[in-house]
Image (cartoon, grey):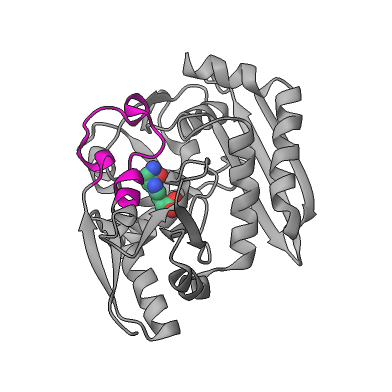
Amino acid sequence: MNSTLKLGTRRSLMAMTQSGLVADALTARTGRPVELVGVTTEGDVSKAQLAQIGGTGVFVNGLRERLLAGEIDFAVHSLKDLPTGPAEGIALAAVPERDDPRDALCGPAKLADLRPGARVGTGSPRRVAQLRALRHDLDVVPIRGNADTRLRKVTDGEVDAVVLAYAGLNRIGRLEAVSEIFEPDQMLPAPGQGALAVECRADREDLIELLATLDHAPTRAVVTAERTLLGTLEAGCSAPVGAYASWEEQIVHLTGVVVGYDGERQIRLSVSGPSDDSERLGRDLALRMLAEGADQLMGESTS
Ligand SMILES: NCc1[nH]cc(CCC(=O)O)c1CC(=O)O
């Protein structure tokens, strides 16, 4: 059968762009035509701060419901928006090759050149804490909205700069706004940042096989290490947890950080090991971080 596959996607420019890339790649590799189906999720309509509407999963659940209902065949998410727990009846059919995982400062100047007390906008406790660790004097202010909305707050003068994922800025064609890209030793990205997740129903074996052509094994190994770290810490996307793993000749190098909200205290540890055991790497590193007091630091920042 060569019927057209329905790819469910959020309607934002970023989501449509990344879904379009996955659709084209699948058609190129398998010859199957793919049609994009726009879906509105709770995360797109709620005006509440993300942390207050339960954080994890708001962008993902609406698409998963449509998968389970059989209205769409597969869905593409930003992997960092995916909750770490298992989803009943859903398969992670592919993790395509990752884009740049780093965070980027967007504004008129590099971090060191912003005026004393400059206002930097971000809604992510992970970015807040690491920004404060880099420059204590900054006035870090909570903002939300999609990347375009956040960039507009800089041009409107509401904030001096914002921090966004480089991969997302690339997908929406806004790299010209970037003044500095943070290396992982300055700011560890969110687990899975820059990577995509391709999901379908767990009972669609034919489709799982087809979508597997999009999978990139080294990316799957590194994001598995990062996400297992996050899951074992029992932290969500609203926790001040950063993780980044790289892959080199079957070896995964994983670094994780938990930062107190003031940015002053942090627990930062690394581990390396075989990529076919990346889940164990993530778990072991999380347990070592917990032994050093990670849960206490995380608890302080959410209160
Ligand atoms: N939380 C929203 C979100 N989910 C994925 C990305 C960026 C793209 C990616 O990380 O793959 C963003 C925006 C941002 O953090 O700047």
What stretch of residues is rendered in magenta?
41-65
- Whether 59 is among the magenta residues is yes
Asked which quadrant contains residue 13, the reply is: bottom left
Q: Is residue 235 above or below residue 16?
A: above
Return the x and y of residue 91 as percentages of the image width and height. Answer: 48, 57
Decide which of 84, 161 is in the foreground and name it. Answer: 84
Asked which quadrant contains residue 293, the reply is: top right
Q: Is residue 251 above or below residue 265?
A: below
Residue at x 56% of width, y 17% of height:
299
Q: Residue furthest right?
A: 273
| Horizontal side of residue 201 vs 227, given as left or right | left
| Residue 265 in view here | no
Decide which of 27, 65 is in the foreground and name it. Answer: 65
| Horizontal side of residue 35 vs 284, given as left or right | left
Return the x and y of residue 7 as percentages of the image width and height. Answer: 30, 65
Q: Residue furthest front?
A: 203
Asked which quadrant contains residue 49, the reply is: top left
| Horizontal side of residue 230 vs 116, given as left or right | right
Residue at x 35% of width, y 77% of height:
24
- Whether 12 is among the magenta residues is no
Residue at x 39% of width, y 54% of height:
77
Say which quadrant the N terminus sits in.
bottom left
**Number of numbered callouts drawn:** 0
Return the x and y of residue 202 as percentages of the image width and height. Answer: 46, 58
